[in-house]
Image (cartoon, rainbow, N blue to C red):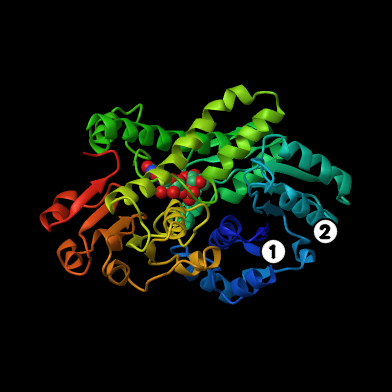
Amino acid sequence: MTLRISVIGTGYLGAVHAVGMAELGYTVVGVDVDADKVAALARGEAPFYEPGLDELLAKHSATGRLTFTTDFAAVAGADVHFVCVGTPQRRDGLAADMRYVEAAIDSLAPHLGSECLVVGKSTVPVGTAAAMADRLAKTAPVGAGAELAWNPEFLREGYAVEDTLRPDRLVFGVTSGDAERRLRGVYARAIDDDTPVIVTDLPTAELVKVSANAFLATKISFINAMAEIAEVAGADVTKLADAIGHDARIGRKYLNSGIGFGGGCLPKDIRAFMARAGELGASHSLAFLAEVDAINLRRRQYVVDLTRELVGGSVANRRIAVLGAAFKPHSDDVRDSPALNIAGQLHLQGARVSVYDPKAIANARKVFPTLPYAESAMEACRDASVVLHLTEWQEFRELDPAELAGIVETPVVVDGRNCLDADAWRAAGWTYRGLGRP
Ligand code: UDX
């Protein structure tokens, strides 16, 4: 019989996971408390931009193998329940807001009438899984018959479908051989014999996720710290990254310097990790992450200050083109986006900012409605005193610097992602400023 799967929470993680599970051939129901999101998904429309998602959503909605609802009763009878709800940063501090995870467990519990596996995928403070297992054992009618496992998700936005269907590794935090067997069964169609599967206890599985994100954030802030040094020493951080990246122990990936990391994961995850270490009496162990965060936030300030300097001391009434609003390309996500933050700061300092992004304008308007937005890169750049390249969309790399030079007021470009062809822009008459480059 086909495995029946429920997915609780249909945000970036849950929607992609639900679609991925349907693509693997299972019968899937996605449940969310947000009626608008559920209605969109039920119509076969992804509530956010993710390459490849719309096609698979339409394909599986049409077969009826994939359904979405706000009614938790629909999870009854599923063999495996994946908890994919968000764990945003709390408003009153650095810690993760756990209310959605707790609510998901509480809403699931009454409907777990038979032996089943509840699998946490959300990124959570270590210790959550054990607490949720206790909560479930006390509240589910089947008691301990509903077993809890933790299976962190490592998907990257922009590659989420690919990462879900072909994970580079799987981590199973389990308390029994049966849970491991069930999880191996679920993923059997997504992996081959070479895919590493790490089977471990619950706290290790939870920690794998946050420590991976902490390491990635540290790698980016390391190269951005080198960019600061390169800046004062007259060196080129991109050449430096290439050179150290050839050392296989370091690796070139994730060493791109620029305006730093943003998004719904890395910034809030390192903060929640610090908060949790504090609760466990080990804040000293993660004190360095405060510096990682500080270096990262300094990048945004640096670009704002550099822009002010480039236009002669004040941005008031100066036209500034901002290319990019998403926190990274191939995504319409503007959560904690460095690009949007920089645009916002300049706007608040009186600049006449014009922001363009190929996918993220609708979301940007929701969080920053007063910013002026453009319909195209050319429109954003018209009469600009400075062009800021802040999200590295392919479309921006393909801009013709000679054509653009003809429509700006002053041909000055700040490459906040260090990836434009500096020689081509200079040859077309531009003053090109990379970050951490001479
Ligand atoms: C990240 C992790 O990569 C993923 O494994 C985890 O599951 C969720 O968090 P994501 O937030 O989708 O994924 O984006 P990612 O591609 O990691 O980029 C995060 C941020 O770092 C972006 O703002 C990006 O621009 C920035 N970044 C990335 C750099 O500044 N330099 C780099 O070299 C790489």
Whether residue 75 is visible: yes
Residue at the image position 37 percent from the left and 55 percent from the top:
391
Type of residue at label 2?
His
Q: Nearer the viewer, mark 1 or mark 2?
A: 1
Relative image position of residue 102 (x, y in whole percent): 77, 49
Question: Which corner quadrant holds the C terminus?
Answer: top left
- Which mark is first along the chain, 2 or 1? 1
Mark 1 Cα within 10 Å, few/some/many (few <14, many 20+)?
A: many
* Quarter occupied by residue 322: bottom left
CB at mark 2 closer than 8 A to ligand 1? no
The label shown at residue 374 is none
Comparing 175 with 210, the one in front is 210
Q: Quadrant of residue 132?
A: top right
Name the side, left or right, on which 53 lies relative to 203.
left
Q: Position of residue 222 (x, y in %)?
A: 40, 32
- Front in this rendered view, residue 339 or 125: 339
Q: Nearer the viewer, residue 201 or 382?
A: 382
- Residue at 18 percent across and 61 percent down: it is 401
Give the quarter of the figure containing the N terminus.
bottom right
Say whether residue 336 is left or right of residue 98.
Answer: left
Taking 253 as reference, is 44 above or below it? below
Q: Label 2 crowding class (10 Å Cα cut-off): few <14, some 14-19, many 20+?
A: some
| Residue named by callout 2 | 111
SS label for mark 1: loop
Of the numbered discs in the image, which one, if any, rests on residue 32? Answer: 1
Ligand 1 within 8 A of label 1's CB?
no
**Is residue 194 visible to the viewer in this orientation of the structure?**
no
Q: Residue furthest left?
A: 427
Q: Given the image, on which type of amino acid does mark 1 rest? A: Asp
* Label 2 residue SS: helix
- Return the x and y of residue 377 as percentages of the image width and height: 31, 68
